[in-house]
Image (cartoon, grey):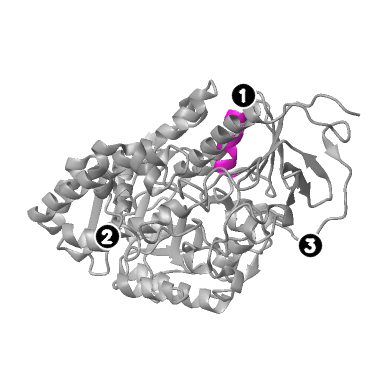
Amino acid sequence: MAGAQRESVVVVGAGIGGLAAAVPLAARGLAVTVVEAADAPGGKIRRLSCGLGTAAVGVDAGPTVFTLRHVFDQLFEDAGSSLEAAVRLAPATLLARHAWPDGSRLDLFADLDQSADAVGRFAGAAEARAFCAFMAEAGRIHRTLDRSFLRRQKTSPLGLSLRLGAGRLGDLFALRPYTSLMRALAGHFRDPRLVQLFGRYATYAGSNPWRAPATLMLIAHVEAAGVWIVDGGMSALAAAVEALARRHGVAFRYGTAVTAVETARGRVRGVRLGSGERLEATHVVFNGDPAALAEGLLGADVRAAVRAIPRRARSLSALTLCLHAEARGFPLAHHNVFFSADYAREFADLAAGRLPHDPTVYICAQDRGAFGRAEGSEGGGPERCLAIINAPADGDRGRPSPEEVNRCLETVFPALAAQGLSFAIPPGSLRVTSPADFAARFPGSGGAIYGRASHGWAASFLRPGARTRIPGLYLAGGGAHPGAGVPMAALSGRLAAEALLKDRASMPRFRRVATPGGTWMPSPPTAASASPSSPSSAASSRPTTTGPAGPTPRTTLPSTSPSTESAPAGR
């Protein structure tokens, strides 16, 4: 039958970008359906089960640092709700604890003066002054880009210049896009440990600090402006945004793979599911890696929607270790970084496609802080920890192999023990996710977690924007503008919704409906499959063994082999 049809949107993927797009679209009266291959919201925000039987606990296995809270405050407020009413948050007074192989340690705090005092005690008064100058420059860069670039639709260098205006062209050059982050830091600090510490911020965007622009100094300002601890972890944040979407009528279909986005007369008409079912839609928001479109993983109709991302332009991947274990010896904070002895070699290994010989290890002790045990305390039994190690994005080539992963584990635990941290890990309480797992879970990514790497002055302008070359198809997520990270992904979703709402005014409001309910008859599925299974749930992954990690000093490893995830794909 034919007749008037309410405009409908299918959001492919329930990551933060997809959720942040769904909320304002539904609040404006559109019929929104979110289709997700996993059985829970969050995308890269997910939980893995660690432990056996009744002793098993869920450990957050994705992003752990929550900044730019105002992005989510605005998302909830615009939808008639409140973030504070949805999740419990507490400001982190201690931003991160940093440690080096020589035994030195440095804490950074939310209070800038307290951090400056700590830097002074760590490296001297001159370095404390340098720290203050560095933070002032980081703040200026963020203020320049916040409303002109990060919160607005993608633009070109010329477009950014026009947004800033002729009177602020000096601010544009002050972004230091042609200077590498490490070179800029060497101009600020004499102590190589401080250069290493602040150079690490490039990895927040999956980038090499020797190749990333000094513009990324703004991340230091973002952290200092506020890091928040979420009661229940980042998974609780994803659940809260999903609940907000449901209150506005968004429908969710979990455990459902989208194999193709289809078009008619040059614009989007809907999506095809793995079952062969088709969902009609006047608009589609794709919350996956944009490379999946360019590689044809969502069908031939939308292969030209975005430019392909060269393999060499991929951001870093990661080797992640989820633990439920007793930590001993080191006074863990919520966020901790254990630096390698040779940072340059670490990134040379990554550039060569190898797991680092001596990696830097980030550890989030998820039960520490405002809603758990005291930071720095000893005892208390097993606790949930996530360790993240940078890795090359060669997961689609099967790298690193299980043998390489085991060799890395055999290096990492003794290195941590040498810095004072050891773990007693019960059987079944170590879960490993490799770049190959990420590549399978996020099709087209090759395991890259952050989309395109931020290398070179033009990198930020090369990310695809909300609009694609296919009318009616929009992008949201860390692979799209404005970039990687939980708040950036949320901003991308809002920008996708903004672009869609603006564009819909120029399209016909009535379309023919092939069958009641807005569903076409199934047709034979194609071989292309963007998300054949679940991307973000521990329950959906079938563990496989990678082999024993072997004995390590001061650390009790599981008596069984650490498990790596199987290869279900999705977003």
Sequence-first tag of 3 and 1: 1
Is disc 3 placed on a helix, strand or loop? loop
Measured along the vertical axis of the image, is residue 77 above or below residue 304?
Answer: above
**Residue labelled with disc 1:** 28
Residue 157's x, y, as percent?
Answer: 38, 48
Mark 1 or mark 2, which is nearer the start of the sequence?
1
Report the magenta stretch's main SS: helix
Q: Which residue is mark 3?
A: 527
Residue mark closest to the camera, 2 vs 1: 2
Tell me where residue 336 sits by quadrant. Answer: bottom left
Asked whether the residues under the numbered discs 2 and 3 touch, taking CB atoms below 8 Å apart as contact, a structural biologist would say no
Q: Classify mark 2: helix, strand or loop.
A: loop
Q: In x, y percent, where is residue 344?
A: 31, 72
Query: CA gap, disc 3 to disc 1?
Result: 36 Å
Q: Is residue 67 visible?
A: no
Q: Residue at x 54, y 74 (%)?
A: 400
Q: Is residue 16 magenta?
A: yes
Q: Which one is in front, 465 or 9?
A: 465
As shown in the figure, which amino acid type bears the numbered disc 2?
Thr
Q: Residue at x 65, y 68 (%)?
A: 544
Front one among 45 and 505: 505
Q: Is residue 32 above or below residue 179?
A: above
Choose the circle earlier in sequence order: 2 or 3. Answer: 2
**Pointer 2: what residue?**
179
Mark 1 closeness class: few <14, some 14–19, many ≥20 residues within 10 Å:
few
Say what amino acid the circle numbered 3 marks: Ala
Closer to us: 133 or 103 = 133
User: What stretch of residues is rendered in magenta?
Assistant: 15-25
Q: Comparing marks 2 and 3, which lies closer to the viewer?
A: 2
